[in-house]
Image (cartoon, grey):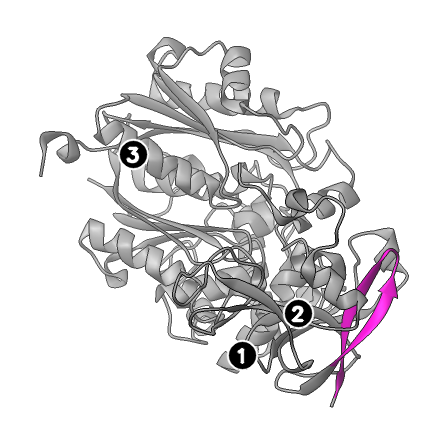
Amino acid sequence: MSDSLQRGAWLRGAGNTRFGRLAGSTPLTLMARAADAALAEAELSRAEIDGVLCGYATTLPHLMLADRFCEYASLQPAYAHGMAAGGATGGAMAMLARELVRAGRCRHVLVVAGENRLSGQSRDQSVQTLAQVGEPQIEVPNGASVPAYYALLASRYLMETGLPRDALADFAVLMRKHAGAHPDAHLREPLTAAAACAAKPVATPLLLSDCCPISDGAVALVVSAEPGPGRPVRIAGAGQAHRHQHLCAIDSVMTTGAGEAATRALGEAGIGVDGLDYLAIYDSFTITLLMLLEEIGVAPRGGAPARLLAGDFDVDGALPLNTHGGLLAFGHSGVAGGLMHLAEATRQLAGRAGDRQIGPRRRALFHADGGVLSSHVSLVLEAL
Amino acid sequence: MAISAESALPEGLHPYAEGLEAGRVRYQSCGDCGAAQSLERHACQRCGSVRLAWRDAAGVATVYAVTEVARAPDDSFRTLVPYTLVLATLDEGPRVMAHAEPGVAIGDRVRAGFFRHGERTLLRFQRE
């Protein structure tokens, strides 16, 4: 292996705004606040940031959002651009930041995303923008929304695994429980399984409780050639998979690419699923979480609800899952929503989670998907 | 930026939409290996050939996935709520998204029908 590839890439600092309705916020103000917090935690000055990767914002479509953000935040990096891979954008940015650091191109890469997805547009606008991940001739004209796309996946997945619909509810309940402990979360009120099952249908088999909220918020991370304060956390493995964009092009709901991406990341880290002790898994819908956990191999097919009920995904369980509350409860502000899983995993592994710190954890798997389980990014984090 | 079918044919309908207007479900098939394609492709999913042509399907399919939509994405569909959407696998192989009669289940055999919605004709499956 060449010298450059032996360089490590460290998750040096993380920052986030509160998620929810943040009146008067814009993508730029939100991202700037999250970036300030990440720089403070990383103990770096603006001048030391030599790379910036910026997620897209549906409320601020722009040809070069990274440059616009850098100007606003008074950053002058040697490398910068925007990125777009749907919900997997945060993971893809962190993966690229790692490569930039390992190749010696950059020393300190700021990965940042945020938008006022809730307050900056009407609910209809947001739903219609997101529905455009559908195929324009054969899918979108039918009046499908993103929840309907995932409902179609869910109907098939539940049929193939034999799971009852209500098995989904426990994932919504768990994410609310975790969010209840995080002061920055969007939905902090407890949710009972009975209330989750009694929620209004959005697109069967999915109820409102199976869907994440739309939030304002931003998250930033610094990926660096040197570790940050606290216990050093490095990105030990990364992998992607891209097998389709649209629902009609998925051959089987059992093979979406999640397993392929995770296998690549775990292989690079030199461990198996059994070597993990923390999970940060994308959860745009309860069904997303269930399908990803099982395709990655955390549980056998149809077995994730049993692991949940056994307490394995609790904060004191064998595999704590999304201890900030995930998209389902911490909130979904676009790219930042997916990046928050990485921020939380980093903090927990580094021992920087404050009052919410769980027991010592060594190896986390982060996984995110964009579109309809279309773009997949897996990262293995390792605390030294 | 890639040139899309829409920009290449500014005045004409997309071949799939044109098929629906004529009461046909269309799909692409490969002129070299014969493989049927889901959605519109530039190159064959199986052999990579770019000799793809649109054909008419017989209109018979099997339901792969189903949902009843309670919350529509816009006003034009709000009047139809609740409506049933399916992913259905045409007997020729490709998968399409369409409306369907209420109560269809995964595995049901269905036949294509068509309805007018605003400026478009949409596909709606009925049980065989």
Asked if residue B39 can be seen in this view, the reply is yes
For the residues labelled 2 and 1, the Cα–Cα distance comes to 35 Å
**Secondary structure under the numbered disc 3 in the rendered image:** helix
Determine which quarter of the picture holds residue B97: bottom right
Tell which tag, 2 or 1, sits nearer the viewer.
Answer: 2
Determine which quarter of the picture holds residue A216: top right
As drawn, A176 above or below A43: below
As drawn, A279 above or below B110: above
Which range of residues does the magenta coloring cover? B112-127
Q: Quadrant of the C terminus of chain A?
A: top left
Other residues around mark 3 within 10 Å, as few (<14) / some (14–19) / many (≥20): many
**Secondary structure under the numbered disc 2 in the rendered image:** strand
Q: Amino acid at mark 2?
A: Arg
Which residue: 57% across, 75% down?
Answer: A156
For the residues labelled 1 and 3, the Cα–Cα distance comes to 38 Å
Which residue: 45% across, 71% down?
Answer: A254
Q: Is residue A124 magenta?
A: no
Disc 1 + disc 3, Cβ < 8 Å: no
Is disc 2 in the same subunit as disc 1? no
Q: Which residue is mark 2?
A: B26
| Image x and y of residue B98, in percent | 71, 69
Q: How many marks?
A: 3
Q: Earlier in the sequence, mark 1 or mark 3?
A: 3
Q: Chain of mark 1?
A: A
Q: Amino acid at mark 1?
A: Leu
Which residue: 50% across, 17% down?
Answer: A67
Other residues around mark 2 within 10 Å, as few (<14) / some (14–19) / many (≥20): many
The image's mark for residue A251 is: none
Q: Amino acid at mark 3?
A: Arg
Q: Which residue is mark 1?
A: A163
| Image x and y of residue A163, in percent | 54, 79
Q: Which residue is mark 3?
A: A98
